[in-house]
Image (cartoon, rainbow, N blue to C red):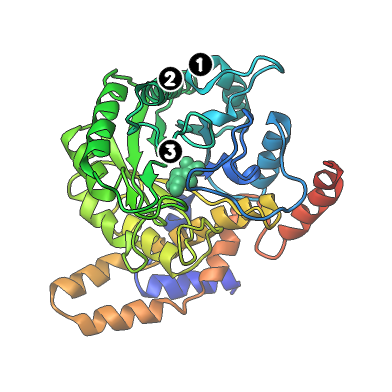
Amino acid sequence: MSSFEQAKTAYSNIGVDIDKAIETLAKTPISINCWQGDDITGFDSGGTGGGIQATGNYPGKARNFQELTADFEKACSLIPGKKRINLHASYAVFEEGNRPERNEVEYKHFIPWVEYAKKMGIGIDFNPTCFGHPMVKDNLTLSSPDDKVRSFWIEHCKRSRRISNAIGEAMGDKVLCNLWIPDGIKDMPADRKAPRMRLKDSLDQIFEEKLENVIDCVESKLFGIGVESYTVGSNEFYLAYSLSNPGVYTLLDNGHYHPTESTADKIPSLLCFFDKIPLHITRPVRWDSDHVVLFDDDTREICKEIVRNDALDKVLIGLDFFDASINRIAAWTVGTRSVQKSLLNALLIPHDKLKVAQEQGDFTTVMALMEDTKTLPFGTVWAKYCETQKVPQDGNWLPEVQKYEKEVLSTRK
Ligand code: RNT
Ligand code: ZN
């Protein structure tokens, strides 16, 4: 008997169908963040600042559309399953000397991305870029007391939604348009409400236009570097906003809560009220550090909640990490494959049996079955999945990245 046949028997003994798990995984899209490829630099010479920052100086980072798309393509050849690319408005493509301001971006600046995505057979998601720009004043954008600043960013966000809609139309798809702003205050604020009332008004203006091909969402945060004392777009603020504005969803980023809070637990809570939950999977190390996602407890718990609640079509899984200290193609590959491993792990758990045991008050079975499942031959199933998807198995993809680094990345000086 092959090791795969053995694994099949071991899983069917606990009532799990491996083939079905593999099939489900292959259909689940992961939205991969384009910004891991260039440390969120973008093409419009903005860069980061305002509470997010990539650290490290690994050589060979992509400097333009050609390089970023080539690198992403390399990563995609090592990542199984369905993929989307998550873009930021700062990745507008334009001819030298024709740089659009953030309040001038249009769909035409993203046509090259649409052509690329079509060629690659992947979807697109989108984000306005409200950071790394001189119009971020005193760490404020949509909540600024300065009307010039606030209207500049309102216009940018309105345009970002229209761009998302046009991309969706061109792709015959719905595009997730996620709004995150860095707005906050470094030290004790004197007024916590006024900036929030201004943000609420800005959001009302931004979301006024109904757009068919867009799934709108807002992303809260706890704090950022330089804005430690107060974040305008807090969890409660955005959750209340999205509940009172149907069609605007709340995005969960697992780096944006108190360290002992479980993001996994938030998923079934929100599923009681929302038909969609956009998600950023990241790895916060002591703070919202956006390390590359691993096949670790946090990621596995998040994926478990998605799978056991039958929510693979409700949770829109996206990645949000940016490590500039390692090979960026390896970062994409490890991060995405880790989420897929975690999903597969979740798909191989006998959830129905476990749920029945819990309902019957049989917590002994719950604990024992959960623990025993952990030592079943998961790796064999993952290897099979990679094989059926025609991507290298664990242990075989890194040499490909190293070859690409030598032949392509090292020539970028
Ligand atoms: C920042 C948010 C946001 C960004 C990206 C680049 O704390 O997590 O999602 O990381 O939009
Ligand atoms: Zn995020």
Confirm whether residue 17 shows in the render.
no
Indicate the quadrant where residue 299 lies.
bottom left
Image coordinates for residue 369, horizontal then vertical, percent: 32, 79
Measure the alpha-carbon separation of dots 3 and 2.
Answer: 23 Å
Q: Which residue is mark 3?
A: 138
Which of the two discs, 1 and 2, labels the residue nearer the N terminus? 1
SS class, disc 1: helix
Q: Which residue is mark 1?
A: 104
Q: Is residue 156 above or below residue 400?
A: above
Q: Is residue 4 above or below residue 254?
A: below
Image coordinates for residue 292, horizontal then vertical, percent: 56, 58
Do callouts 1 and 2 mark residues in contact (Cβ within 8 Å)? yes
Q: Is residue 253 above or below residue 110?
A: below
Image coordinates for residue 238, horizontal then vertical, percent: 26, 42
Q: Residue at x 70, y 31 (%)?
A: 64
SS class, disc 3: loop
Mark 1 residue type: Glu
The tag on residue 86 is none
Residue labelled 2 has its Cβ within 8 Å of some atom of ligand 1: no
Q: Residues within 10 Å of mark 1 (few under 14, many from 20)?
A: few
Q: Residue at x 43, y 38 (%)?
A: 138
Q: Which residue is mark 2?
A: 159
Which of the two discs, 3 and 2, labels the residue nearer the N terminus? 3
Image coordinates for residue 243, horizontal then vertical, percent: 18, 39
Mark 3 residue type: Asp
Q: Nearer the viewer, mark 3 or mark 1?
A: 3
